[in-house]
Amino acid sequence: MVLFGMDLGPHWAFIVAAYAVMILVVAALIAWVLVDHRIQARTLADLEERGLTRRSGRRREGA
């Protein structure tokens, strides 16, 4: 089979399937990271709304 001007030979189905699976896995990982970011941001906003703050946001007493 010739795809984009390249002859992939007798193993074209495996090659195309491997690239398709790789694209799906990378897309799933990107979606997972974006969804997790939204969940973490929402959780952090909820905690800050309750009055809890991050240690990195606190001032040092001696400074």
Image (spheres, rainbow, N blue to C red):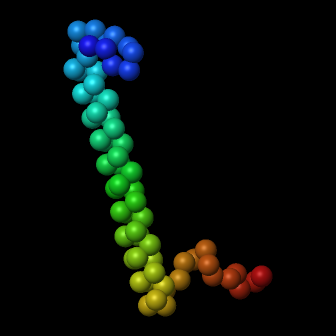
Which is more toward the observer, 34 or 40? Answer: 34
Q: In this view, does 5 lie above or below 63?
A: above
Horizontal relation, residue 2 to residue 5: left or right: left
Where does the image place residue 17, in percent across and percent down from the top left?
24, 27
Q: Which residue is drawn at 32% across and 29% down?
A: 19
Where does the image place residue 32, in percent across and percent down from the top left?
34, 56
The image shows a total of numbered marks equal to 0
Where does the image place residue 53, in percent across and percent down from the top left?
53, 83
Q: Which residue is drawn at 37% across and 70% down?
A: 39
Q: Residue at x 32, y 35 (%)?
A: 22
Where does the image place residue 37, in percent across and percent down from the top left?
42, 64
Quadrant where the N terminus lies? top left
Q: Which residue is drawn at 33% across and 19% down?
A: 3
Which is more toward the observer, 37 or 10? Answer: 10
Horizontal relation, residue 57 to residue 22: left or right: right
Which is more toward the observer, 17 or 29? Answer: 17
Quadrant where the C terminus lies? bottom right
Instruction: Kindly indicate the quadrant of the structure image that contains residue 14.
Output: top left
Q: In this view, does 48 lie above or below 38?
A: below
